[in-house]
Image: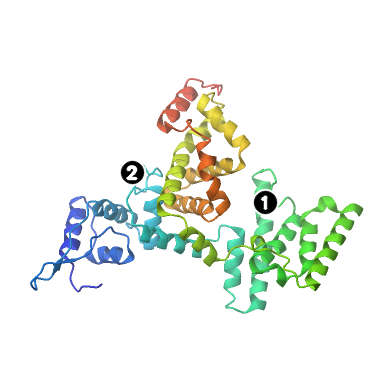
Amino acid sequence: MVWKEPSEAEQQLREQLAAHGLSVSWAKIRRWREFGALPWRKRQGLGRGAGSASELMPETFPVAAALALATVKKRPLEQAVLEVFTTGTRFDQVLAATVVPLPERAVRRSLAWYMARDHSHPLAAIELAAASAGGCPGMAMDAALESAHRIFPRLYRQAKQQEQPPGTTVPESLPDADGLATFAVAAVLGFEEFGADAVVEAIRKSMPELADEFGEQVFAQLSSALREAEGDGADLWSRRTRWPSLEDRVQAMEQVEYAQLCRIRDALTLLVEASPALALARRAGVEDPDVRHIEAVRALNRRTDEYLRRAEGVSRSPAERAWKGFTGLLLHVCSSPGRLSTFQEDVTALDPALNDVPGLGRRVLARCMAAPDGNA
């Protein structure tokens, strides 16, 4: 609904914000309302032709104040909503000490907006490149291949420069990068677009350790079996081998109950808050029972270790970019049924080490200060 003039409630909210030093036009407040970002009561008729009126809800002001802070610099409203939802309302801190009661509609719309623009995952970047071809299959394939063969060698070089151990998330060699690039495009556009031989060749490139007589036999048998299955019209590639489309990923996010989405956000916030102390303890070799427990858990659980590593990355990000890393991590959990089903178990394994994050930080800092020689 659009009105030519501000309603009494909109004007009242603007005055409340101004009293706290926040200058916000009523047109911006109207836009927040129409987007669904403000908790707002429905207008109620006054009866006997007296019109209608709406009153502010108790939670309206804190949400509006947070959005006002998040829109001091010009940016999309969706980004402002995600900043408030993930990393708090102040630009000089990452911690979200106070949860702002954002309406579900605005959060979900903003998450879908982010997913449509995010290309941090290699397969998402390949998907965007293919989509830029305007629906032409040949051009989509060329754009996807060009993107993939640019991304995976870069991942290999970055991993090598940062001295990261090779693993499943980065190519182990340039031939591996070449094979993974082809495999990634097949995962996005469909393995049937490549055929059995091309996919087997991509796997061969990614596994140079099988470049011997035994490997030749393995790949020959695999190629023969896949060609035979293709000839029989079998569905070679299950849906699980395909990169889910943007529509599928958004739908997976929509199926997560909002209360659960918020609980996951809160758990990740705790990991982000704990990250500086844990990183300092690790560098300084601090002996602390809670730190030892956390390190023991992450050594046994790769998912927990991944969440902690990514949370540390968020904690190190400049405040204006922290929301992006946090949103990516949140969606990493919520868009995968496998990760979603194990998330609670993965993070509660850290209990009770993170029950008092400020206390943990003080202990780590005190022990570092007490041991200037680096022996904490």
Q: Nearer the viewer, residue 234 or 358?
A: 234
Image-quadrant location for residue 31: bottom left
Front-lying residue, 156 or 355: 355
> Residue 283: horizontal and vertical position, in percent?
56, 31
Q: Residue furthest right?
A: 213
Q: Amino acid at mark 2?
A: Thr
Q: State the residue lying farthest toward the bottom.
A: 136
Residue located at (20% from left, 65% from top):
43
Residue 131 placement (x, y as % from top left): 57, 72
Vertical comparison of 80 with 294: above or below: below
Name the N-terminal-most of marks 1 and 2: 2
Residue 143's spot in the image, x, y percent?
A: 64, 71
x 62%, y 79%: residue: 136
- Classify the position of the N terminus by image quarter: bottom left
In the rendered structure, the answer to whether residue 69 lies left or right of residue 319 reads: left
Question: Residue 170: which disc?
Answer: 1
- Residue 299 lies in quadrant: top right
Which type of secondary structure does the marked residue at label 1 adopt? loop
Instruction: Look at discs 1 and 2 and give the one toward the viewer.
Output: 2
Q: Which residue is mark 2?
A: 98
